[in-house]
Image: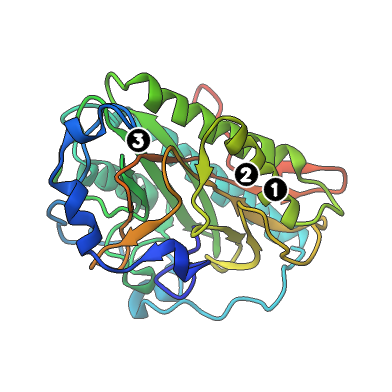
Amino acid sequence: MLFRSLPCCLISDASVLRNRRRCFSFWNLGTQANSSRFGRFEVVEPGKVLPAQLVPEHIKSPPWADSGAPPTPPNIAECKTEDSIQKMRRACRLASKILHSVKHLAKPGVTTEAIDQLAHQLTVAHGAYPSPLNYRGFPKSVCTSVNNVACHGIPDDRPLRSGDIVNIDVTVYLDGHNGDCSETYAVGEVDARGRRLLDVARRCLDDAVALCRPGMPFSDIGGRVETTAAYADHAVVPAFIGHGIGTYFHGPPDVYHCWNTYPGTMQPGMTFTIEPVVTQGGREVVLLEDGWTAVSADGSRSAQFEHTVLITEDGVEVLTGPPPLAED
C-alpha cells in the first residue's frame, strides 16, 4: 500500500488530516456512537506495541532491513524478465499462503500482536523476510487495521472483539522479490452494515482485476473501482493507492482507486498491486502521531482487499490468489 510523502504514499493532502485532535471526538464516543450511522462496532484506539521480532541472520534481507531506507525504484513501470516473473510467482504464493495461514486468528480474544507473531514465524520459516519490518521504520512484520483504522495499523496488545473487522496485510521478500496481499475478515458476529462493507470492498477489487489486460490504461482501474463502490452507496478513500512491485516494495505504476488521469497502459510482464480502501463514511483520514496509523476522520469503518497481479500476453494473472485447499 502506497501513502506518498509519508511512510508509504499520500495522494492528496486534502484527504489526510495530520491533526490527531480530530480523533478524540469519536474515540470518546465508543460503540454506541456508531450504532445508528455506520452500524454497531467499537471505535479503536491504538494499544501497546511490543518490540519487533528478530529475523535469523541466514535470511536474505532487503536493503531497508537495517537502514530503513528503501532503494530508488525504477523511473517507469518495468516489464519483467521470465526469471523475475517466476520469482514474483514464488514470493506472491508465499505471501498468500501466510495470509491464509493466519486468518484463523481473526477471532475474539486474539490480539493483533499474536497475528503479527505467527505471520513473522511462518515467513522466516520459509526462508523469507517480512517486507514491512523496518521499511521506513515500520515497527512490525505485518499491518493489521481494525474497524475505523483505514490502513497501516500497527499490531498491538488490543484483543479483537466480536463485531470487529480486521484487515491483515502480508508482504514477503523472497529471492530478492516482494509479494503483497491483504484481506479483511469478520471477527465473531459482525452487523449487517459491516458484512455489506466487506462484500462491496471485495467486489471493488474483483471488478478492477477483471479490467486488466495489455493496452488497458492504468487510470481505468480508478474509474471502475469508484463506480462499483458508488453503486453500492460506499466510497473509496483516495489517499491510498496500489503500486508497482518487484525487487522494490513500491514503484511505478501508481494505481489510483479513484477517478484519475495517470498516464500509461498495461503491458505484458508488468506486476503491480490493486488494493482499494473502501469506506462506509467519508473519504478523509487522520494520520496519527506514530506516523503510520490512518483512521477515518468521522469514525466510520473501512475494508480493503489486495492482490498482486501480472499482466500476461492475453490478460491478467492473479499472483496472490488463494492457495490450494491442501495448503489453506
Residue type beneath disc 3? Val
Residue that label 1 marks: 223
- The one of 294 and 27 positioned closer to us in this rendering: 27
Residue that label 2 marks: 226
Task: State the CA–CA distance, disc 2 to disc 1.
Answer: 5 Å
Q: How crowded is mark 2: few (under 14 residues within 10 Å), some or many (20 or more)?
A: many
**Eye-nearest disc, 2 or 3:** 2
Is residue 328 visible in the rendered image? The answer is no
What color scheme is it? rainbow
- Residue shown at 26%/33% (left/top)? 34
The numbered mark at residue 102 is 3
Task: State the CA–CA distance, disc 2 to disc 3.
Answer: 30 Å
- Residue shown at 23%/56% (left/top)? 23
- Residue shown at 76%/45% (left/top)? 212
Among the 4 quarters of the image, the one containing residue 55: bottom left
**Eye-nearest disc, 1 or 3:** 1
- The one of 219 and 297 positioned closer to us in this rendering: 297
- Residue shown at 33%/53% (left/top)? 297
The numbered mark at residue 240 is none
Residue type beneath disc 2? Glu
Whichever of labels 1 and 3 marks the residue nearer the N terminus, that label is 3
Determine whether label 2 and label 1 are within 8 Å by CB: yes
Position of 283 with respect to 54 (left or right) is right
Q: Position of residue 13 (x, y in %)?
A: 46, 70
Whichever of labels 2 and 3 marks the residue nearer the N terminus, that label is 3
User: Judging from the image, what secondary structure is the residue with disc 2 in?
Assistant: helix
Position of 126 with respect to 74 (left or right) is left
Residue type beneath disc 1? Gly
